[in-house]
C-alpha cells in the first residue's frame, strides 16, 4: 500500500512537471515588434549631410525601426573612420568613393542613394587682385591633396589651359589651409560650405569658380560597406527609406528643417537660405533619374566612369576599380514601390 501511494505521488509529480513545461512551450510570445537594427552612420556639417540630424530628432529612424548610432565629425574624419571600418555607413562623395576603392583601403563600399549635388557649394576663393583662374598661374593655392576639392581645381585648370605645375600647390588639411589663406600666406584656397564663410572674411577676397561650373561633378551619397549591405540588406533599405522620409518632412516643415540643418552646420538660418540653391537635396524621383545611364555628369553611371578615368589619368589611384559594382539602385527602386 505504501509503495503504491509512493508511486501515485511520483506520477503526480511527473504530470505536474509536464504540464508546467507544456505551458511554457505553448505560451505565445507577447512581443509585437521586431527589435530595431543598429547601424553606425557618419555625417558632417556639410548641409547635405546635416539633414540626418532631422531624422534623428524627428523620430524618422524609429519610424523605420532603426537604431542609429549617429556619429558627427568633420568630413575628412568621418571619411577616414569609414575607410578604417569604424562606420557601417557614411555621407560622402562619388569621387571619394572611387578614390578610396582605388587606393590601399580594404573597405569595399557601395553607393545606395544620392543625397545632394554640389551646384556651387564647393568654391575657389582668392585674394584681392586675382580675378580668374588663369591669374592663378604662379600663385600659391591651398587644397587637400587627392580630395574632391583637388578634383575641382584640376578640372578648372584644365578648362582654362593650365596644369597643376603652373601653380604653387600647398597641400594641407582644410583648417590649416583656411588659416594660411586668412593670414595671407597663400593666394587661394579650395573650400566648401560652411567653411567658405570664414574664407570670405579675408578683406577683398572673392569667389572665382564654384562646382556650379561643372554640373554633376560633385555628388554626395549614402555609402555603405559591402559587407554590411550583404549581411543587413533590410537595414540598408530602412536607411534609404529614412532618407526619403526625411526629405518629405523637409518639404512640409521647411522652417524647422532649416533650423536643425543650420545649427548642425554652424550656419545662421539666413546663411543657409542663401546657400540652399547650391546644395539641392534629392528625393526619390530625382534619385531614380540620377541612377539611369545618360551621357552627362548628372548621370551617376556616366559620372563614375569619368571620375575613374580622371583618377587613372592623374595616377592618383593604384588599383583597378569595378565601376559597375559601385552603384546599387535596388534600394531606391524598392522605396518607390512602398
Image (cartoon, rainbow, N blue to C red):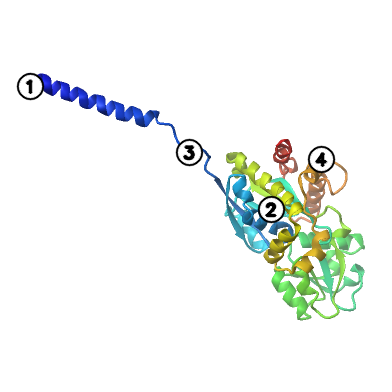
Looking at the rendered structure, which numbered label has been put on residue 31?
Answer: 3
Task: Decide which of tag 3 and tag 2 comes sooner along the chain.
Answer: 3
Query: Around disc 3, counting alpha carbons within 10 Å, would you say few (fewer than 14), some (14 to 19), or many (20 or more)?
Result: few
Label 3, secondary structure: give it.
loop
**190 to 319, vertically: above or below:** below
Q: Are marks 2 and 4 in contact (CB under 8 Å)?
A: no
Q: Give the residue at x 73% y 57%.
A: 48
CA gap between label 2 and label 4 equals: 23 Å
For the residue pair 80 and 247, the one nearer the viewer reads as 247
| 61 relative position to 164: left or right | left
For the residue pair 165 and 281, the one nearer the viewer reads as 281
Quarter of the image with the N terminus is: top left
Q: Which residue is mark 4?
A: 292
Q: Position of residue 193 (x, y in %)?
A: 76, 65
Task: Decide which of tag 2 and tag 4 comes sooner along the chain.
Answer: 2
Q: Nearer the viewer, mark 1 or mark 2?
A: 1
Q: Which residue is mark 2?
A: 100
Task: Decide which of tag 1 and tag 2 comes sooner along the chain.
Answer: 1
Q: Are marks 1 and 2 in contact (CB under 8 Å)?
A: no
CA gap between label 3 and label 2 equals: 43 Å
Q: Nearer the viewer, mark 2 or mark 4?
A: 4
Q: Which residue is mark 1?
A: 2
Amino acid at each position: 500500500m505504501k509503495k503504491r501511494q509512493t508511486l501515485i505521488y511520483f506520477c503526480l509529480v511527473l504530470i505536474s512537471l509536464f504540464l508546467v513545461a507544456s505551458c511554457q512551450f505553448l505560451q505565445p510570445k507577447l512581443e509585437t515588434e521586431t527589435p530595431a537594427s543598429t547601424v553606425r552612420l557618419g555625417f558632417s556639417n556639410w548641409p547635405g549631410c546635416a539633414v540626418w540630424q532631422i531624422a534623428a530628432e524627428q523620430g524618422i529612424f524609429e519610424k523605420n525601426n532603426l537604431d542609429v548610432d549617429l556619429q558627427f565629425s568633420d568630413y575628412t574624419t568621418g571619411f577616414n573612420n569609414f575607410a578604417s571600418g569604424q562606420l557601417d555607413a557614411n555621407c560622402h562623395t562619388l569621387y571619394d568613393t572611387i578614390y578610396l576603392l582605388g587606393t590601399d583601403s580594404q573597405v569595399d563600399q557601395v553607393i545606395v542613394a544620392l543625397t545632394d549635388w554640389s551646384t556651387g557649394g564647393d568654391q575657389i576663393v582668392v585674394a584681392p587682385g586675382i580675378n580668374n583662374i588663369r591669374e592663378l598661374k604662379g600663385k600659391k593655392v591651398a587644397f587637400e591633396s587627392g580630395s574632391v576639392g583637388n578634383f575641382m581645381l584640376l578640372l578648372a585648370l584644365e578648362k582654362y589651359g593650365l596644369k597643376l605645375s603652373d601653380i604653387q600647390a600647398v597641400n594641407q588639411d582644410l583648417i590649416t589651409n583656411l588659416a594660411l589663406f586668412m593670414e595671407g600666406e597663400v593666394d587661394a584656397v579650395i573650400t566648401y560650405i560652411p567653411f567658405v564663410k570664414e574664407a570670405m572674411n579675408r578683406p577683398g577676397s572673392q569667389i572665382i569658380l564654384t562646382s556650379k561650373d561643372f554640373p554633376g561633378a560633385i555628388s554626395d551619397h549614402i555609402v555603405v560597406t559591402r559587407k554590411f549591405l550583404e549581411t543587413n540588406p533590410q537595414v540598408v533599405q530602412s536607411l534609404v527609406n529614412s532618407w526619403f522620409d526625411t526629405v518629405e518632412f523637409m518639404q512640409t516643415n521647411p522652417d524647422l528643417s532649416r533650423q536643425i540643418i543650420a545649427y548642425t552646420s554652424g550656419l545662421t538660418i539666413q546663411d543657409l537660405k542663401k546657400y540652399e540653391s547650391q546644395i539641392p537635396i534629392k528625393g526619390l524621383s530625382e534619385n531614380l533619374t540620377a541612377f539611369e545611364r545618360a551621357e552627362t555628369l548628372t548621370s551617376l553611371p556616366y559620372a563614375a566612369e569619368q571620375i575613374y578615368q580622371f583618377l587613372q589619368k592623374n595616377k592618383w589611384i593604384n588599383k583597378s576599380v569595378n565601376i559597375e559594382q559601385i552603384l546599387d539602385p535596388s534600394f531606391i527602386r524598392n522605396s518607390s514601390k512602398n
